[in-house]
Structures are given as C-alpha cells and as structure tokens.
C-alpha cells in the first residue's frame, strides 16, 4: 500500500471523531480536503473505510483495521520523536500538553515560567474536555495532561499540584450578591444556573454536589465555555459555578460577585497525568520536576476570597 502518513493522520482524526466536519476543524483543513485524502486512502485500500447510517458515519471492518494500524503507526512516530529528543536532551525538546478547558486560565503562565528555565523548548497546547483528554492519554497522543481527578481504573499516573476551588458566581446586582451572612445551601434550589457541558469536570462536580443535597439543578443555558458562563451570569441569566481560576479579571473589574454559600468553595485539585506505560521524554520529566519545584510555587498559590462577616 502506498498510503502517506498525512492520509493516515487525517483518516485517524475522522475515525476518532466519526465526523468529517469535526476532523476538518481539528486539523484546520477544509472538509473537501479531508474527504479527498480519505477517498485516496480508500482507493489505495480498495475497500470503503466508512459507511453511512442515516446522517452518521461509522467505520467498516476494513476501516477499523486501518484505524488500529493508523494509531500504532502514529505511536511509532511519536516514539521516534521522543527518542530523538532524548538524544538531544531537554534543551531542544518539544512538549505536547493537553489541558482541561478551565486549566487554560493558568496553563500558559506555567508554560511561560518553564520556558524561562528552558528557553529552547517548544510546546503544543491542546485545550479540550475531559473525555477527549482521556482518549488522548489512552491513544498516546500527548505527553502530559492537566485535568481534575482522573479515573482510578485506567492505569494512569497522576499527581495533584494545585487547588481548584469551585465557587458560585452572580451578577453584582443580584439580590444574593449583597447578602452579608452565609447563604444556606438550601437557597440554591430556588436558583437557575448557567452550566458547563455534561462531560466537563466542573459540571460533574456540580452535579455531584446537587445530588448529594437532593436538589434538582435548574439550568438556563449549557455551554462549553467558561467565558460564556461569565458573560451570561453578569447579564443576570442565572447563577454560575466555576473555578476560581477563571475569575481573576472579572473580580478585579467588579463584573461578578462570588456568593458566600455554605459548603463553598468546593475543593477540587488539578492533577498532572500520564499513562503508566508512557515513555516520558526529558522535557516531560523536566516539566514534572518544575511543577514540584520552588520556582513553580508562586504560580500555584492564589488568594481565596474573603467575605464580610
Ligand atoms: P473542566 O475542568 O470543567 O474545564 O473540564 C476540568 C476539571 O475540573 O476536571
């Protein structure tokens, strides 16, 4: 077969997303370009790789085989890259890091501080949801992941390195924002919330909290974006529950208020994660050591809000 690595990469993205459109977005290509590459691969294989059921596509048996090989070829390429960077040492390596949407609020500051130690290291930073982070780990598509508590049953190595307090926010003119005493959690059942998508770590923690109190979560809007939540909350569309990490500017500018609700903040932690079988590159090892070092400490601490008594 005369398939190219590019064709296999494009095919693997369509197979993972089960969508030509999403693969085109992911790869920053046009949809016709993606379709053409997959078509050429199908011509080489002499078999269809996808079949259509209604509006959805799925892999054919040949497609599934091709996908397994495409993943293992991609993995081999990554391993060559890792070995080459090991031979070059940390100085000139590359770190592929994938972080949860919320971690975007602080990840670049950490990368910038790491770059001051190793100026020639380059990065790729993927910002995505929890499910996709776990997929990337399982398919060895990234060096390190920053996420909330990872599942215990996937053979992952993880280390907590920073708090992730979740707080309830409101527009500054919301009646609860001027409450001087602690707001009992039972008052949350009268409120409507602007929430993250179901696969977000923040949303999962939120649902867990509401379930533990037997409160039905009333939602006004669901979105994949923390900024959209903040805009919607400041426009009084509802209350929001977000990580304190996302609020620095809004609190400074007085665009949002943190509510002093009983039980809050919910205390979560950020973890840096890789698979047990991952052969860590020198850069990835240096990054883990950096997170543990005194140099990173100032970046990993922040002020909790204080409330009027
Ligand atoms: P997220 O944050 O809500 O942006 O996915 C990750 C997490 O808290 O686990």
Image (cartoon, rainbow, N blue to C red):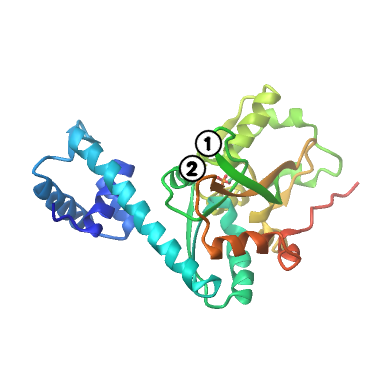
* Quadrant of residue 51 within the rendered picture: top left
Residue located at (80% from left, 32% from top): 184
Residue closer to the observer: 34 or 64: 64
List the single residue furthest toward the top.
Answer: 214
Q: In the image, residue 268 lies at what x, y percent?
A: 69, 43
Residue drawn at the location 15% of the way across and 54% of the way down: 36
Q: Nearer the viewer, residue 55 or 28?
A: 28
Please determine whether, in this image, residue 154 is positioned above or below residue 136. above
Q: Is residue 280 visible?
A: yes
Tell me the crowding category of disc 1: few under 14, some 14 to 19, or many 20 or more residues within 10 angstroms, Cα based. few
The x, y position of residue 206, in whole percent, is: 63, 35
Whether residue 172 is visible: no
Q: Which percent across, then down, holds residue 94?
A: 48, 67
Q: Quadrant of ligand 1?
A: top right
Tag 1 residue: 154
Q: Earlier in the sequence, mark 2 or mark 1?
A: 2
Instruction: Assess whether mark 1 and mark 2 are in contact (beta carbons under 8 angstroms).
Output: yes
The front one of 215 and 220 is 215
Q: Residues within 10 Å of mark 2 (few under 14, many from 20)?
A: many
Side of 7 where 281 appears, left or right: right
| Residue 134 tag number | 2
């Amino acid at each position: 077969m005369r398939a190219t690595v590019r064709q296999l990469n494009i095919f693997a993205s369509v197979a993972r997303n089960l969508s030509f459109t999403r693969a085109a977005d992911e790869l920053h290509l046009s949809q016709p370009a993606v379709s053409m590459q997959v078509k050429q691969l199908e011509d080489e294989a002499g078999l269809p790789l996808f079949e259509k059921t209604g509006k959805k596509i799925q892999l054919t048996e040949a497609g599934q085989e091709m996908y397994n090989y495409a993943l293992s070829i991609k993995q081999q390429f990554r391993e060559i890259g890792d070995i080459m960077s090991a031979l070059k040492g940390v100085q000139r390596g590359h770190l592929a890091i994938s972080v949860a949407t919320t971690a975007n609020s602080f990840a670049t500051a950490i990368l910038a501080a790491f770059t001051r130690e190793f100026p020639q290291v380059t990065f790729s930073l993927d910002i995505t949801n929890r499910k996709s982070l776990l997929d990337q780990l399982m398919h060895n598509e990234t060096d390190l992941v920053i996420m909330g508590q990872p599942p215990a049953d996937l053979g992952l190595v993880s280390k907590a390195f920073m708090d992730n307090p979740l707080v309830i926010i409101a527009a500054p003119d919301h009646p609860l924002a001027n409450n001087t005493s602690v707001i009992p959690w039972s008052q949350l059942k009268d409120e409507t919330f602007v929430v993250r998508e179901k696969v977000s770590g923040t949303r999962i923690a939120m649902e867990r909290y509401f379930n533990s109190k037997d409160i039905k979560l009333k939602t006004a809007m669901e979105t994949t974006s923390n900024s959209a939540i903040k805009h919607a909350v400041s426009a009084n569309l509802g209350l929001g529950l977000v990580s304190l990490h996302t609020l620095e500017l809004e609190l400074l500018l007085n665009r949002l208020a943190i509510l002093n609700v009983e039980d809050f903040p919910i205390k979560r932690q950020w973890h840096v994660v890789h698979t047990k079988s991952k052969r860590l590159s020198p850069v990835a090892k240096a990054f883990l050591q950096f997170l543990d070092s005194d140099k990173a400490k100032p970046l990993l601490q922040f002020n909790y809000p204080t409330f009027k008594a």
